[in-house]
Image (cartoon, rainbow, N blue to C red):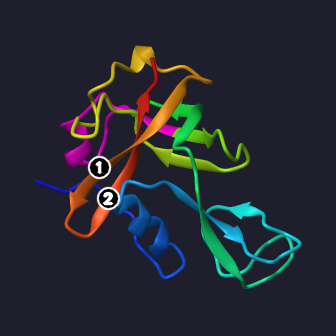
Amino acid sequence: MESLLLPVVDEDGAPFWEYAARGELRVQACAATDCGRLRFPPRPCCPNCRSFESEWRAMSGRGRIWSYVVPHPPLLPAYAAQAPYNAVVVELADAPHIRLVGNVVSGPDAPLNSVDPGRLRIGASVKAVFVPVSPDLTLVRWQLER
């Protein structure tokens, strides 16, 4: 059986995945004294002030669904077996200009199809859950808040 698609971890984004493995949602920020702008995806240079100084700031792990889709066949075999599932774009509560892509699941150990697509709504509140998918990678997924 074909496996699920996994992110490629590069040098700039490696800290994001290291924090996720510890159950922390962090976002890269410019460390220049007069800037401090949050940015995602991670990159070496601040697009605001062009500084190469950066740090990783903790986020609350809360957000809202900004957009979503429920893919329909034909799908890659590993995903077809889990249909219907969702793919969401989440706008972070701490940084509304930052949006992360993921899936809404019923809990950290739940499969991609664990939430009825009819429960998803634009603007719905979600919180981050951390899902180890291999010894080297923990994904950030989302759970609907009650």
Q: What residue is shown at x 40% (from left), y 33% (from top)?
A: 104
Q: What residue is shown at x 63% (from left), y 40% (from top)?
A: 91
Q: In the image, what residue type sits under mark 2?
A: Thr
Question: In the rendered view, does 10 fall on the left or right side of 77?
Answer: right
Q: Position of residue 35 (x, y in %)?
A: 85, 69
Whether label 2 touches label 1, CB < 8 Å? yes
> Quadrant of the image for the C terminus?
top left
Q: In the image, what residue type sits under mark 1?
A: Val
Q: Label 2 belongs to which residue? A: 138
Question: In the rendered view, does 143 fall on the left or right side of 121?
Answer: left
Residue 10 shows up from this direction = yes
What is the chief secondary structure element of the magenta stretch?
Answer: loop
Residue 131 is labelled as 1
Q: Quadrant of residue 43?
A: bottom right
Does residue 43 show up magenta in the picture?
no
Neighbour tally class for label 1: few under 14, some 14-19, many 20 plus, Cα within 10 Å: some
Give the residues in magenta: 72-88
Question: In the rendered view, does 64 fall on the left or right side of 131?
Answer: right
Q: What residue is shown at x 37% (from left), y 31% (from top)?
A: 72
Going from N to C along the chain, the mark reached first, 2 or 1, is 1
Label 1's element? strand
Query: Which residue ends up furthest to the left in the rendered image?
Result: 1
Q: What residue is shown at x 35% (from left), y 60% (from top)?
A: 22
Q: Quadrant of residue 7?
A: bottom left
Q: Position of residue 24 (x, y in %)?
A: 44, 55
Q: Position of residue 17 (x, y in %)?
A: 41, 66
Alpha carbon separation for disc pair 2 and 1: 5 Å
Neighbour tally class for label 2: few under 14, some 14-19, many 20 plus, Cα within 10 Å: many
